[in-house]
Image (cartoon, rainbow, N blue to C red):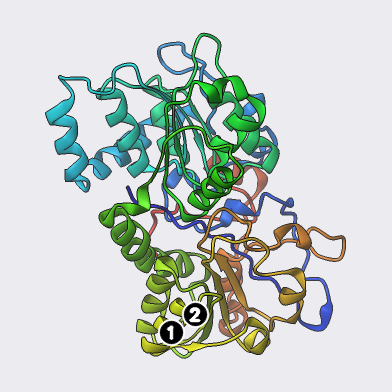
Amino acid sequence: MSQMPETTFADLSLADKTAVKKSSIEARRFSDVSTCSFSSTCFTGSSDEDEISPKDNQQRNSAGGTDFCVKSISKSAFGRREIEIAESEMPGIMTLRKRAKEEKPLKGAHIVGCTHINAQSAVLIETLIQLGATVRWAACNIYSTQNAVAAALAEAGIPIFGWRGETEEEFWWCLDRAIHSEGWQPNLILDDGGDATHLLLKKYPDYFKAIRGIVEESVTGVHRLYMLSKGGKLTVPAINVNDSVTKNKFDTFYTCRDSILDSLKRTTDIMFGGKQVVICGYGDVGKGCAQSLKGQGCIVYITEVDPICALQASMDGFRVVRLNEVIRNVDVVVTATGNKNVITRDHMNRMKNGCILCNMGHSCSEIDVNGLHTPELTWERVHEYVASLHLATFDAHLTELTDEQAKFMGLNKAGPFKANYYRY
């Protein structure tokens, strides 16, 4: 299963210690333009839709079901097409589905899942169901959900809770809805980051006693499991998916090697040749990112706490530095440690104007995003914004949509103006 990049993207002008240009973008909603290598229905909808949280807007699928919460059930047909495309790219799991669906080896399994909600994970979810399991699912990341795919799963009658651009409060609300349902109790956890395990243990200890096993996908989540084990709180078997060579290499290394460029190019549209980049962490994710950016002609620096990983980086031709040594000069900062507060507000204050900051680790814990929610700073869109800066050179004058036109097209007047599958 491919892991989507968990990019927390901000192109913030902090030079001269002044606030960046004003924008109407609401704090925590900047994810409307965060790396979306996803579907057409991930782009910002009309302003009327954005004002209403999906959790306050009960919807029904075509069968009348309401046990789900997604951005818009009307996008299910597009999401179904995306799932079908993903099925053709995942022959291993489709072969497994075909071989075992008659035997129903997962009969009796009640799985609560907390992973990225994308076309690839949808193939996994529907495979689990065809093999006999019942599932309830939430998104593990507030930025990466493919809204159309979530809608397709909801239309198929699957209890799915998640949309792109959730607030933190909405994230925990969705996860709680996935875990707790009248007449249903989980006995297995499929987690990415450890959040489902954490909430079950903290809020539903009686449920946790009935859990027969945990499957954890991320390095961060595995670390949290080890901490539980040390404290004597991990009372059930747990499987580290990264112990699988195919997952560890293909999902963690090869996929990140592709997705780092895909994400950055979609959100910045800049040339990478000659850019100075610092990658925090040289695990499999960091290795994939470093290899990819080096291939683009970037000058790549690595920060590491592990001497073995640092030695690997050195042997691979990268210079290992402390972040403070290069933070004023680099053009791109990538976090891939799985830790917290790797990039602080102080670091961001010292970045040069236009420095790109993104996260490839778990959620946004590595970057102190909350430290940016201060009165002197505002948030600014950067897809179309970067392009608009070049228009004056050509004496080009941009047409502005009327309110009626924007509503008709289902767009925000400030953009984005094209669906994410659109190729300029």
Mark number for residue 307?
A: 2
Q: Residue at x 51, y 8 (%)?
A: 183
Instruction: Decide which of 175, 54 is in the foreground and name it.
Output: 175
187 vs 58, left or right, is left
- Residue 260 appears in the figure: yes
Q: Is residue 107 left or right of residue 46?
A: left
The amino acid pointed to by label 1 is: Leu
- How many other residues sit within 10 Å of disc 2, few (<14), some (14-19) or many (≥20)? few
User: Residue 215 occupies which quadrant of the picture?
Assistant: top left
Find residue 303 and report its image quarter. bottom right
| Residue 291, horizontal then vertical, whole percent | 36, 78
Q: Tell me the element at label 2.
A: helix
The answer to whether mark 2 and mark 1 are in CB contact below 8 A is yes
Q: Residues within 10 Å of mark 1 (few under 14, many from 20)?
A: some
Q: In the rendered structure, which amino acid carries the disc numbered 2?
A: Pro
Please determine whether, in this image, residue 369 is positioned above or below residue 92. below
Q: Nearer the viewer, residue 404 or 14?
A: 14
Q: Residue at x 36, y 41 (%)?
A: 121
Residue under pointer 1: 311
